Image (cartoon, rainbow, N blue to C red):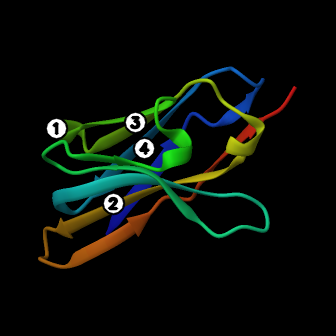
Amino acid sequence: QVQLVESGGGLVQPGGSLRLSCAASGSIYSIYTMGWYRQAPGKQRELVAQITRGGRINYAESVKERFTISRDNAKNTVFLQMNSLKPEDTAVYYCNADLHSTTGARYNSWGQGTQVTVSS
């Protein structure tokens, strides 16, 4: 079994910064792509950023130049540094990982989500 646990959400003023972390644990053999998605009230879940094990990165257009994704492969952890936050960044942020477990099963796992609220 694999678990993803996010941390770092909260309330921040427009223009502020937050850093999200997500640690994967359990019967993990290898994690391929890790990423962050978000879902605002009344909207569909959308990709924010993702990073492959080799370091290839993809960002949503709306967060380019403001957000930075990184990962620590040794610790099965992914980070999202969010700068110049805007009210429209308000959402529940979910961590995602595409991985193989030690049993050989391929999983696409999700964290429980962490709330990010940008408001004055």
Position above or below: 106 against 47: below
Q: CA distance from mark 4 to mark 1?
A: 13 Å
Q: Label 4 is placed on what type of residue? A: Cys
CB-based contact (under 8 Å), mark 3 and mark 4: yes
Name the residue rendered at 33%, 60% in the picture: 97
Residue 94 in picture, x, y percent from top left: 53, 55
CB-based contact (under 8 Å), mark 2 and mark 1: no
Q: CA distance from mark 3 to mark 4?
A: 6 Å
Closer to viewer: mark 2 or mark 1: 2
Name the residue rendered at 13%, 68% in the picture: 102
- Which badge, 3 or 2, is on the more N-terminal residue? 3
Q: Which residue is mark 1?
A: 74
- Which badge, 2 or 1, is on the more N-terminal residue? 1
Q: Which residue is mark 4?
A: 22
Residue 116 in picture, x, y percent from top left: 68, 41
Residue occupying the far top of the picture: 16
Query: Which label sits on residue 79?
Result: 3
Question: In this orientation, which residue lies closer to the viewer: 58 or 107?
Answer: 58
Q: Label 3 is placed on what type of residue? A: Phe
Task: Check disc 3 and report its element: helix, strand or loop.
Answer: strand
Task: Check disc 4 and report its element: helix, strand or loop.
Answer: strand
Query: Which label sits on residue 97?
Result: 2
CB-based contact (under 8 Å), mark 4 and mark 2: yes
- Which badge, 1 or 3, is on the more N-terminal residue? 1
